[in-house]
Amino acid sequence: MIAEDYNKLYGLLEAFLGEAADVEAQISDTTRLVRETDAYLATYRGGEPDDVKVFSPRKMEILYKEEIQKKKEEKSVYEERIQCLRRRKEVLDGKISDLQDILSRRKQDFSSRMEASREQYKASVKELDSLADKIGESSAYIEKNPFQARQDFAIIAKRLKETAEQLKKIMR
């Protein structure tokens, strides 16, 4: 992959992390609403004072039946929403985990490629040093043995081209 693709993946990861935080906040808010509804319902369950019991034979649950039913339905809706949000959070966590794995592999691949490039670079530099020495030796042959000098210069030219190609690969 190219760097632009990885930048897009980092952007997706940030978006998923932001969305996961939003979902977590919604779960927290909805859980708070469930607790408030439970507290509200608890006030109607056996929460009437003793003097009310003496004067009114009916229970508060019967008197406020419609309101209690409405609160129970609200609580049910909140609980369903929490379940839906938790499933969404699980999906987001899975995607976040997958993206983090991919991006961590990129770092490993990058470091292994950098190590290989360093090795190629060192080998190319060593080859260039060797070729410089060979050129120095070949210049002595020019007068003594011109045929040998031509062969040496042909070999040097070939090696220089190979080394240049290796350096081009390193730079990619």
Image: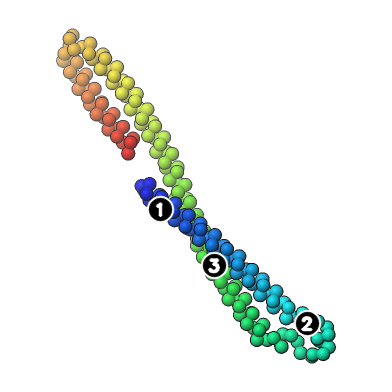
Q: Which residue is mark 3?
A: 85
Front-most of residues 147 and 4? 4
Residue, x 27% and y 30% (percent of image)? 164
Q: Earlier in the sequence, mark 1 or mark 2?
A: 1
Q: Secondary structure at mark 3?
A: helix
Badge 1: residue crowd in 10 Å (few <14, some 14–19, many ≥20): few
Q: Secondary structure at mark 2?
A: loop
Q: Is residue 133 at all visible to an observer of this figure? A: yes
Q: Which residue is mark 2?
A: 48
Contact, CB < 8 Å: mark 1 with mark 3? no
In the rendered image, residue 54, in percent from the top left (x then y), is placed at 83, 88
Amino acid marked by disc 2: Glu
Disc 3 to disc 2, C-alpha distance: 36 Å
Q: Which residue is mark 1?
A: 8
Residue, x 68% and y 74% (percent of image)? 38
In the rendered image, residue 130, in percent from the top left (x then y), is placed at 31, 20
Q: Earlier in the sequence, mark 1 or mark 3?
A: 1
Q: Earlier in the sequence, mark 3 or mark 2?
A: 2
Amino acid marked by disc 3: Leu
